[in-house]
């Protein structure tokens, strides 16, 4: 581990104090009533320093809510542990899984989930915030490790479930749920309850028998991950550009956007570098926000085609459940290796921006809904052929799969290694494809 530089350590400590103060104020007066001045007064961090580290009050509050989300999940895990260990049998664990799935699918945590996602977006270009969130991810992972270890020791789990992979699974489900707000198409809660119940029971080996993934006991070692290169993820099918001026503008704006996010898109600098006039820009765009919205849409569209094609090929091309599992695991495990996982961060930024900006939501919802529908159709085709179990809603599975890249980002931030992801991913995909008790 590379030791932190003193300046970095001071920055992280400052962020932790500010977030701790914000958490306390949110719990006392509610997020709507919290102001920078109050946080500054309670934490001893100046207004200028708060702006430097967080950029805005919204960013600070989202980070504070992310910490509260981690605490809420931790409290639920502690309650589940007490309930299961007090009873001491697998039936009690199954009951806890079902009740937890019902609570999670109810939408009660959606606001905290959005804040968690917002905090990830804000932290993308702020190292001290990433360090703070990495700490919350590791904290949740450590608590999960203790719980899963006890359950395995008591014979309730068929194999040692890796806690880091479970942390990623929770985030994939979170994004699958939140994307429904953007496309304005919520599935019935019972469909999510079923997916969660199936995934957790099978993925954790809570089946009453030996752990038997579809592709065999050595699956975790034999499935070959195929992380795509960054260039392979991108295509030229972004927003439609009308002429040379727009192409020059977008070439510069894309570079700034990829390097520094929305904050890096300074119109005057972009126009000067691209060699286009402010008058031209005013005629073509309704201000900077439209340009930024188009950059979000562009980043999504440039990855959509390759991703959709890969998932469709997985479900339509495989002749049996083993083939589906091998393809899914091969595509997802290892995506955090190298720099490729950074491209998936665009997905987080897109959802967060689309939730608050109606203009972006209007233009991104149709292609996003179309992508989800295409993946759903492919899953339904596999279900009709008996390749994928048909008691899990195809639409819920498609949305869960759409959220997996965000789980990859979380894994990378938290330092969760590929080896820890692989066995669980095989088990999880096996459970979602075929009933291990059948």
Image (tube, rainbow, N blue to C red):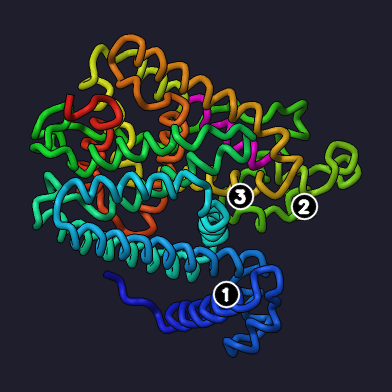
Q: Are marks 1 and 3 in contact (CB under 8 Å)?
A: no
Q: Residue furthest front?
A: 87
Q: Which mark is residue 27?
A: 1
Q: Secondary structure at mark 2?
A: helix
Q: Earlier in the sequence, mark 2 or mark 1?
A: 1
- Left or right of 116? Residue 155 is left
Find residue 207 and report its horizontal and vertical position in percent. Answer: 17, 38
Q: Quadrant of residue 30?
A: bottom right
Q: Earlier in the sequence, mark 1 or mark 3?
A: 1
Q: Is residue 15 left or right of residue 272?
A: left
**How busy is the neighbourhood of tag 2: few (under 14 within 10 Å), some, or many (20 plus)?**
some
Write down the region rendered in magenta.
Answer: 294-306
Q: Residue at x 65, y 27 (%)?
A: 366
Q: Which residue is mark 3?
A: 352
Q: Is residue 428 left or right of residue 352?
A: left
Give neighbour class at mark 1: few <14, some 14-19, many 20+ (Cα, 10 Å).
few
Q: Which residue is mark 2?
A: 267
Q: Label 3, secondary structure: give it.
A: helix
300 in magenta: yes
Q: Are marks 3 and 2 in contact (CB under 8 Å)?
A: no
Q: Of tags 1 and 3, which is closer to the observer?
A: 1
Measured as percent of width and height from the top left, residue 309 is found at: 44, 21
Task: Work out which residue is located at the far top of the displayed protein and give it.
Answer: 385
- Structural crowding at the residue carrying mark 3, measured as other residues with C-alpha within 10 Å and reported as few (<14), some (14–19) or many (≥20): many
Instruction: Estimate the spatial distance between the alpha carbons at disc 1 and disc 3, rounded to whole Å.
Output: 23 Å
């Amino acid at each position: 581990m590379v030791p932190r530089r003193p300046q970095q350590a001071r920055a992280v400590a400052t962020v932790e104090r500010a977030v701790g103060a914000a958490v306390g104020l949110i719990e006392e007066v509610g997020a709507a009533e919290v102001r920078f001045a109050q946080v500054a007064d309670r934490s001893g961090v100046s207004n200028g320093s708060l702006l430097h580290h967080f950029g805005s009050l919204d960013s600070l509050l989202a980070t504070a809510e992310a910490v509260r989300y981690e605490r809420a999940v931790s409290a639920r895990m502690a309650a589940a542990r007490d309930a299961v260990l007090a009873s001491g049998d697998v039936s009690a664990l199954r009951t806890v899984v079902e009740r937890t799935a019902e609570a999670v699918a109810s939408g009660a945590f959606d606001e905290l989930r959005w804040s968690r996602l917002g905090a990830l977006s804000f932290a993308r270009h702020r190292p001290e915030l990433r360090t703070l969130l990495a700490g919350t991810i590791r904290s949740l992972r450590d608590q999960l490790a203790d719980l899963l270890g006890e359950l395995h020791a008591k014979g309730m789990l068929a194999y040692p479930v890796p806690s880091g992979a479970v942390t990623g699974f929770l985030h994939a489900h979170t994004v699958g749920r939140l994307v429904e707000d953007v496309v304005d198409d919520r599935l019935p809660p019972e469909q999510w309850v079923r997916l969660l119940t199936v995934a957790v029971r099978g993925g954790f080996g809570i089946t009453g028998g030996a752990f038997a993934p579809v592709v065999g006991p050595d699956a975790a070692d034999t499935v070959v991950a195929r992380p795509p290169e960054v260039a392979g993820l991108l295509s030229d099918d972004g927003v439609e550009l009308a002429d040379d001026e727009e192409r020059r503008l977008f070439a510069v704006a894309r570079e700034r956007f990829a390097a520094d996010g929305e904050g890096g898109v300074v119109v005057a600098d972009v126009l000067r570098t691209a060699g286009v006039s402010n008058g031209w820009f005013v005629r073509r765009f309704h201000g900077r926000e439209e340009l930024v919205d188009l950059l979000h849409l562009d980043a999504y569209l440039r990855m959509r085609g390759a991703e959709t094609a890969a998932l469709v090929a997985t479900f339509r091309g495989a002749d049996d459940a083993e083939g589906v599992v091998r393809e899914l695991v091969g595509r997802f495990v290892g995506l955090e290796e190298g720099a490729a996982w950074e491209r998936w961060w665009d997905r987080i930024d897109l959802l967060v921006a689309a939730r608050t900006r109606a203009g972006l939501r209007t233009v991104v919802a149709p292609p996003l809904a179309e992508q989800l529908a295409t993946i759903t159709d492919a899953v339904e085709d596999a279900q009709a052929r008996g390749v994928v179990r048909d008691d899990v809603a195809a639409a819920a599975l498609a949305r869960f799969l759409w959220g997996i890249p965000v789980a990859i980002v979380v894994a990378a931030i938290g330092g969760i290694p590929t080896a820890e992801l692989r066995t669980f991913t095989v088990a999880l995909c096996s459970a979602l494809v075929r009933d291990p008790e059948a």
